[in-house]
Image: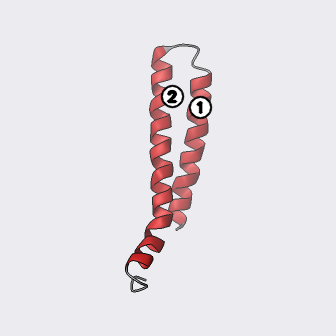
Amino acid sequence: GWIGGIVLTIAVIMLFWSSFLYAFAGGDEERVKRAKSYMIYAIVGIAVAILAFSVVPFLRNVLGGYFY
């Protein structure tokens, strides 16, 4: 569980950082492209962290409490 928390924290910080980079890109195509790629990585990281928190309860429900 704590690894998911660390991943989520890093992904949220990365999301804020990418939005900062995007806001101050100044129309430079390379900087905008880099900010967008960071944003995609951050969103994927958030999705992975959410899945990390929900896999064990999901498996417990599916397997009827036999998974510990």
In this rendered view, identify the residue nearer to me: 64 or 6.
64
User: Residue 61, located in which quarter of the rendered image?
Assistant: bottom left
18 w.r.t. 46: above or below: above
Instruction: Identify residue for label 1.
Output: 19
Instruction: Identify residue for label 2.
Output: 35
Residue 8 horizontal/vertical position (percent): 55, 53
Tell me whether the residue at label 1 lies in contact with that at label 2, contact meaning CB atoms closer than 8 angstroms.
Answer: yes
Q: Element under label 2?
A: helix
- What quarter of the picture does the C terminus occupy? bottom left
Query: Which is nearer the N-term, disc 1 or disc 2?
Result: 1
Amino acid tagged 2? Ala
Question: Would residue 20 appear left or right of 67 to someone viewing this image?
Answer: right
The residue positioned 55% from the left and 57% from the top of the image is: 6
Q: Residues within 10 Å of mark 2 (few under 14, many from 20)?
A: many
Marks 1/2: CA–CA distance: 7 Å
Residue 43 horizontal/vertical position (percent): 49, 43
Amino acid tagged 1? Ser
The residue positioned 47% from the left and 48% from the top of the image is: 45
In this rendered view, identify the residue nearer to me: 50 or 3.
50
